[in-house]
Image (cartoon, rainbow, N blue to C red):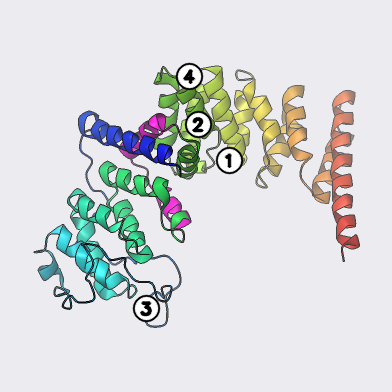
Amino acid sequence: MKKTAVGALIVALSGCIAWLLVEKSPVSNSNAQPREVMRSGLIGGKAESDGRLSLPPDEEMSPSDDVDREDAPPPQVPAMDSDSLCTLDPSSLCDSLSRLIVKGESEDTILLSDEIVLRGDAADPSLKRMLHSGNTAVETVAMRLLIRIGTPSSMVIAMERVINGSPSDAEEDVIKQFANVRNAAVADALVNMAKSVKGDESRVHFSKILRNMEGTAVVEALAKSAVQTTDPSVSAYSRQILAGMNKPSGFPALETILDTGGSPELQAAAASALATIGNGKACESLENHASNCPCCIDAIAQIKSPYAQKALLNIVRTDKTKAVRNAALTALSRYKSPELASELSSIASGETDEEMGAQISNTARQINELCESVNGASTNSP
């Protein structure tokens, strides 16, 4: 990332943290659990037969103030039991975890990690230091722990590291972990951060993370951002992210946007998101709102999900509006399915509207031609 983009991000993060402290009430650490039940692993991947995860060979921590030098005496690792660990401060816990995790995940690293999560925001400064250790294993586990803590301040630190470049072998997994965050304050914080970032590369990262988040909170935060901002570019960016939301768990909030009669641009973004989701409920919602939101007709034509065929066929079979039925046919024409073509031909034979029947038959023919072209290409391939 260019220095200007990083500089803009730092400014955005500073503003975001201040906004969280002033505007938001404290968020409890809902991820904290009693010590005796917190036994989750730290690094994604398959464990070896001894229960540890193999790490890349010859990977050592970069020299820093937080890492022992070669001439330093062996570190004193604290006794690994709950009673002993609870007496240590977060910095000591993180230092011990940094030394041990480079050897792989173990019972001791799990105990240390669980204790760090219990400290909540108090562990943030030490985890932030771990994020810049220069060692992939240490940075990865720090990212995971910040996400497990899950408060707005810890998530902002994690987001900063993602934007500046998380460890390459952990980036996709980190984005997946952000997907499980459904806290409204965190969603507001991330969307608020996005408003202040101008760099294209930063915006790409934000879009990817926000679109992978589950639940209604992120949809509501994006809608609020699009409506309340006075900056047209920020509103457009929020709508752009919203249009690409693809999680079925966001369906209730997307449908609410169509129900409440927001701006045409916001409704179009919500309709596009429903088309991206493309399951039966999304198709039905778009059909039901088509009379009041013309953008829903265009959205139906955009549907490409393999889970939409049944719902789209039902629209062709039962809807009373030609425009809606034609939109469904446009979507269906992309599917390579002889069974679908046969089903459409059957519907066409019973259609009372001659023009509509011809259109249905034409779509069935297009699908058959598409199937034949695919089969022909397969036959001719070496």
**Pointer 4: what residue?**
232
**Pointer 2: what residue?**
254
Q: For the C terminus, give its image quadrant.
A: bottom right
**Residue 175 image position (x, y, % from top left):** 44, 51
**Pointer 3: what residue?**
51
**Residue 115 image position (x, y, % from top left):** 20, 62
Magenta residues span 172-198
- Sooner in the amino-acid sequence: mark 3 or mark 4: 3
Q: Nearer the viewer, residue 100 or 155?
A: 100
Residue 78 in which image quadrant: bottom left
Q: Is residue 82 magenta?
A: no
- Which numbered marker is on residue 285? none
**Residue 81 image position (x, y, % from top left):** 15, 73
Residue 88 in which image quadrant: bottom left
- In the rendered structure, are the residues bearing label 2 and label 4 in contact, judged by CB atoms less than 8 Å apart? no
- At 58% across and 40% down in the image, what residue appears? 277
Identity, as a three-letter code, of the amino acid under mark 4: Pro
Q: CA distance from mark 2 to mark 4?
A: 21 Å
